[in-house]
Image (tube, rainbow, N blue to C red):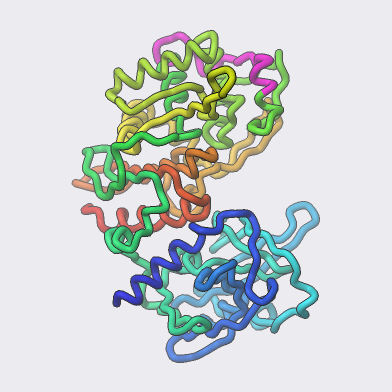
Amino acid sequence: MRALRRFLAMLLTAALLFSAPAAAFAEDGQPFAMTVVVDGNATPVRALQDAYEGNVYLSLRDLSAALSGGEKQYRYSYSYSNEDGYSFHIATGQEADNDSAGGGFPPRSSVTYLSLRRNKLYVDGQERKYYSYREGSNLYLGLTDIELMLDLTVRAISDTKLEFLPSQPFRPNPQTLREDGYFEAFNAIVLGDVTNGKLLFTSQSSRSFPIASLSKLMTYLLVMEAVEEGELRMSDRVPISEAAETLSKSADGMIKMQAGMSVPLEELLTAMLLASSNESALALAEYTAGSESAFVERMNRRAKELGLKSAEFYTAHGLPVYVGESVPVKRQNLMSASDLFTLCGYLLAHFPQLTQITSRQYAKLPTLDYTTANSNPMVFNMPGVTGLKTGNTNRAGFCLTVSLPVRAEGEEHDLVLVMLGAESVDLRGQAAEILLRWAQENYPG
């Protein structure tokens, strides 16, 4: 059992050590044969090993053949268009298509350099946000993400043999993962019920860390309070300043803007929360308080009023600011996971319309001539998730806040997960899905 726990922890931390967009594979980047055993039947499946032993990505095409006929069978297919490129499709409960499954190994010369990215993957018609490798029409997905996607457990038999257990749902215990060191790859975590304050899992919850674009939750709060107090209206058009234009055209810009244009306030809120648009946050701050510095003063003052003792704000968007002269000092917005949990609870209680934005997968921004996807992968990967926000800088790592309504004590409650400082973006998504599934299934209804 201890060996199994160690292997599980190894699988779950696969993304932890190698978060760069591409990496070398075993055998000079070539697929190799991994034996997959299902109900005693062994099937060769193409695999890629990402830089070190145990970090295995399996061919979803081949795996569909290995699982065919069982309770976790699925049909694998793909489509291609000049406009959208490749899209990959999983239809659960359907037998493998012999024409698309398998197909042998390509010539060695045909596999050169593959990149880890979010290829377009749909499960039963619903888009999922997992990182994967594409080799032509073949998609390779990491073992942990396969376990999450199909809700089954994988057991290591040897370095080149895996046993798939379709009847065993994938339910790693957070306490076991803590003991194995899995959560050492994060700065801090809080998971709990913001409706009644009950905490389910915490790690370094009271220590302050950089929070990057999670700062935009406080920006949203101040804008909405200004609307509530009559200082602003949702129908207002916000002028774009030269500073916002400059930011939009910088390396930290998301949506190109021109000084002098005006954008509906509600459109800027959507851009700020879904696309994590820094220029939108700056424009909203300037419009609300007259300048970003005045808005930041409001942020810090409001944080104290709410009892968020760890909060320190320097910008409205969460990007670093440099102070000092001969030796510049980088300052970043700070807060503890515990205080972020409190802030999320306050927002959901007082401005629940927030989730009308943050629960959306995509949004069109007509004035800005921009279509954005939600940066939060949990909105795609877990039914019922209603938000809330992602963030990252080099120092902050990859951060996330997630809200998930559940039935508890005979009424609807909101579970909230706060994760700070994940070492990689894919690890952040995997851990969030693991923790939220565990909480959803084990929280008393």
Q: Work out whether residue 16 or residue 196 is closer to the camera in this orientation and state it.
A: 16
Q: Is residue 414 above or below residue 152?
A: above
List x then y, in percent, for residue 272.
55, 30
Residue 60 seen by the camera: no
In the image, is residue 242 part of the stretch drawn in magenta? yes
| Picture residue at 50% right of the left edge, 33% below the top | 213
| Picture residue at 34% right of the left edge, 76% below the top | 3
Q: Quadrant of the N terminus?
A: bottom left
Outermost front residue: 326
| Picture residue at 65% right of the left edge, 81% below the top | 102
Q: Quadrant of residue 112?
A: bottom right
In the image, is residue 358 part of the stretch drawn in magenta? no
Q: Quadrant of residue 25?
A: bottom right
The total number of labels drawn is 0
List x then y, in percent, for residue 200.
25, 49
Q: Would residue 345 appear left or right of 259 to someone viewing this image?
A: left
Outermost left residue: 409
Residue 105 seen by the camera: yes
Q: Is residue 390 above or below residue 220?
A: below
List x then y, in percent, for residue 154.
43, 75
| Picture residue at 47% right of the left edge, 81% below the top | 162
Q: Would residue 148 appear left or right of 242 to someone viewing this image?
A: left
Residue numbers of the magenta segment: 227-246
List x then y, in percent, for residue 115.
67, 59
